[in-house]
Amino acid sequence: MSKLTVDQKSVKGLFQDCKASFLIPDYQRPYAWGEVECKTLWEDLFVFSFPNDNCDQFNEDDEYFLGPIVTFKNDDRKLEIIDGQQRLTTLMLLLRAFYNKLSHMKDQNSQAMKQDIEKCLWRANNFGAYQKDDLKIASEVATDNDKEEFIAIL
Protein backbone atom coordinates (compact mmCIF):
# COMPACT_ATOMS: atom_id res chain seq x y z
CA MET A 1 0.00 0.00 0.00
CA SER A 2 1.27 3.45 -0.87
CA LYS A 3 1.90 5.94 1.87
CA LEU A 4 0.03 9.23 1.63
CA THR A 5 2.07 12.27 2.58
CA VAL A 6 0.74 15.82 2.57
CA ASP A 7 3.29 18.61 2.31
CA GLN A 8 2.68 22.31 2.15
CA LYS A 9 5.28 23.93 -0.08
CA SER A 10 5.76 27.26 -1.72
CA VAL A 11 5.83 27.27 -5.52
CA LYS A 12 9.51 28.19 -5.32
CA GLY A 13 10.12 25.34 -2.88
CA LEU A 14 8.29 22.89 -5.11
CA PHE A 15 10.08 23.89 -8.30
CA GLN A 16 13.53 24.44 -6.81
CA ASP A 17 13.66 21.05 -5.12
CA CYS A 18 16.85 19.72 -6.68
CA LYS A 19 15.42 16.19 -6.70
CA ALA A 20 12.15 17.21 -8.35
CA SER A 21 11.53 15.69 -11.74
CA PHE A 22 7.92 16.09 -12.82
CA LEU A 23 6.26 13.83 -15.33
CA ILE A 24 2.85 14.30 -16.88
CA PRO A 25 1.87 10.65 -17.40
CA ASP A 26 0.21 9.40 -20.55
CA TYR A 27 -3.16 8.92 -18.83
CA GLN A 28 -3.49 12.68 -18.22
CA ARG A 29 -5.30 14.89 -20.68
CA PRO A 30 -3.20 17.14 -22.93
CA TYR A 31 -2.58 20.74 -21.95
CA ALA A 32 -5.91 22.46 -22.54
CA TRP A 33 -5.75 25.88 -20.93
CA GLY A 34 -6.56 28.75 -23.20
CA GLU A 35 -6.18 32.48 -22.86
CA VAL A 36 -9.07 32.80 -20.37
CA GLU A 37 -7.63 30.32 -17.84
CA CYS A 38 -4.08 31.67 -18.20
CA LYS A 39 -5.28 35.25 -17.80
CA THR A 40 -7.30 34.30 -14.70
CA LEU A 41 -4.22 32.72 -13.09
CA TRP A 42 -2.03 35.68 -14.06
CA GLU A 43 -4.48 38.25 -12.69
CA ASP A 44 -4.89 36.26 -9.46
CA LEU A 45 -1.12 36.10 -8.99
CA PHE A 46 -0.76 39.79 -9.84
CA VAL A 47 -3.42 40.91 -7.34
CA PHE A 48 -1.75 38.80 -4.66
CA SER A 49 1.73 40.14 -5.45
CA PHE A 50 0.74 43.78 -5.93
CA PRO A 51 -2.03 44.57 -3.43
CA ASN A 52 -3.84 47.75 -4.47
CA ASP A 53 -1.44 47.92 -7.46
CA ASN A 54 1.39 48.71 -5.04
CA CYS A 55 4.34 46.30 -4.72
CA ASP A 56 5.33 48.00 -1.44
CA GLN A 57 2.14 46.60 0.14
CA PHE A 58 3.20 43.01 -0.55
CA ASN A 59 3.54 41.05 2.67
CA GLU A 60 5.99 38.13 2.46
CA ASP A 61 4.16 36.44 5.34
CA ASP A 62 0.92 36.22 3.33
CA GLU A 63 0.23 32.91 1.65
CA TYR A 64 -1.25 32.30 -1.77
CA PHE A 65 -3.13 29.03 -2.22
CA LEU A 66 -2.39 27.73 -5.69
CA GLY A 67 -4.55 24.69 -5.21
CA PRO A 68 -3.56 21.09 -4.64
CA ILE A 69 -0.76 19.55 -6.64
CA VAL A 70 -1.03 15.78 -6.32
CA THR A 71 1.96 13.67 -7.32
CA PHE A 72 2.97 10.05 -7.15
CA LYS A 73 6.63 8.98 -7.05
CA ASN A 74 6.98 6.30 -9.70
CA ASP A 75 9.61 3.55 -10.00
CA ASP A 76 11.94 5.97 -11.85
CA ARG A 77 11.70 8.38 -8.86
CA LYS A 78 9.85 10.92 -11.03
CA LEU A 79 6.88 12.78 -9.59
CA GLU A 80 3.92 11.84 -11.77
CA ILE A 81 1.45 14.70 -11.72
CA ILE A 82 -1.97 13.34 -10.82
CA ASP A 83 -3.66 16.72 -10.30
CA GLY A 84 -2.46 20.22 -11.09
CA GLN A 85 -0.72 19.69 -14.41
CA GLN A 86 -2.50 22.62 -16.11
CA ARG A 87 -1.38 24.99 -13.33
CA LEU A 88 2.17 23.61 -13.16
CA THR A 89 2.63 23.76 -16.92
CA THR A 90 1.27 27.32 -17.07
CA LEU A 91 3.55 28.40 -14.23
CA MET A 92 6.54 26.85 -16.01
CA LEU A 93 5.64 28.76 -19.17
CA LEU A 94 5.29 32.00 -17.20
CA LEU A 95 8.64 31.42 -15.51
CA ARG A 96 10.24 30.77 -18.89
CA ALA A 97 8.80 34.03 -20.24
CA PHE A 98 10.20 35.91 -17.22
CA TYR A 99 13.55 34.19 -17.71
CA ASN A 100 13.68 35.36 -21.32
CA LYS A 101 12.80 38.92 -20.32
CA LEU A 102 15.38 38.95 -17.52
CA SER A 103 18.09 37.82 -19.94
CA HIS A 104 18.10 41.35 -21.35
CA MET A 105 18.30 43.06 -17.97
CA LYS A 106 21.67 43.58 -16.35
CA ASP A 107 20.82 44.97 -12.89
CA GLN A 108 21.68 42.86 -9.85
CA ASN A 109 18.07 42.13 -8.82
CA SER A 110 17.08 40.96 -12.29
CA GLN A 111 20.11 38.68 -12.54
CA ALA A 112 19.41 37.21 -9.09
CA MET A 113 15.79 36.53 -10.10
CA LYS A 114 17.00 34.95 -13.34
CA GLN A 115 19.21 32.56 -11.34
CA ASP A 116 16.28 31.66 -9.08
CA ILE A 117 14.14 30.91 -12.12
CA GLU A 118 16.88 28.71 -13.62
CA LYS A 119 16.59 26.49 -10.56
CA CYS A 120 12.87 26.10 -11.24
CA LEU A 121 13.07 25.27 -14.93
CA TRP A 122 16.07 22.98 -15.39
CA ARG A 123 17.85 20.26 -13.49
CA ALA A 124 21.46 20.76 -12.50
CA ASN A 125 24.32 18.44 -13.36
CA ASN A 126 26.68 17.04 -10.72
CA PHE A 127 28.64 20.31 -10.74
CA GLY A 128 25.59 22.51 -10.06
CA ALA A 129 25.31 23.93 -13.58
CA TYR A 130 21.77 24.10 -14.93
CA GLN A 131 21.27 22.10 -18.09
CA LYS A 132 18.99 23.92 -20.53
CA ASP A 133 18.26 20.64 -22.31
CA ASP A 134 17.08 18.91 -19.10
CA LEU A 135 13.70 20.32 -18.11
CA LYS A 136 12.24 19.56 -14.69
CA ILE A 137 8.94 18.70 -16.34
CA ALA A 138 8.29 16.15 -19.06
CA SER A 139 5.14 14.89 -20.69
CA GLU A 140 4.14 11.49 -21.97
CA VAL A 141 0.87 13.00 -23.19
CA ALA A 142 2.13 15.27 -25.92
CA THR A 143 2.70 14.17 -29.48
CA ASP A 144 6.20 14.54 -30.91
CA ASN A 145 5.20 17.87 -32.51
CA ASP A 146 3.72 19.11 -29.22
CA LYS A 147 6.88 18.08 -27.37
CA GLU A 148 9.08 19.95 -29.85
CA GLU A 149 6.91 23.08 -29.51
CA PHE A 150 6.90 22.81 -25.71
CA ILE A 151 10.69 22.38 -25.56
CA ALA A 152 11.15 25.26 -28.01
CA ILE A 153 9.04 27.51 -25.78
CA LEU A 154 10.90 26.52 -22.63
Image: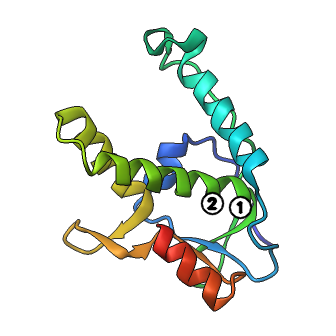
Assess whether mark 1 and mark 2 are in contact (beta carbons under 8 angstroms).
yes
Say which amino acid is labelled 1: Gln
Residue 85 placement, left or right of 9: right
Q: How far is disc 2 from disc 1 in space, using C-alphas?
A: 6 Å
Which residue corresponds to the image point at 63% horizontal and 22% vertical from the top-left? Answer: 47
Residue 89: numbered disc: 2
Residue 43 placement, left or right of 97: right
* Front one among 61 and 138: 138
Say which amino acid is labelled 2: Thr
Q: How many marks?
A: 2
Inspect this view and state whether residue 86 appears. Answer: yes
- Tell me if mark 2 has few (under 14), some (14-19) or many (20+) residues whose alpha carbon lies within 10 angstroms of its own: some
Residue 66 placement, left or right of 101: right
Q: Say which residue label 1 marks.
A: 85
In the picture, which quadrant includes the N terminus? Answer: bottom right
Which residue corresponds to the image point at 63% horizontal and 60% vertical from the top-left? Answer: 89
Residue 60 position within the rendered picture, expressed as x and y whole percent measured from the top left: 47, 20
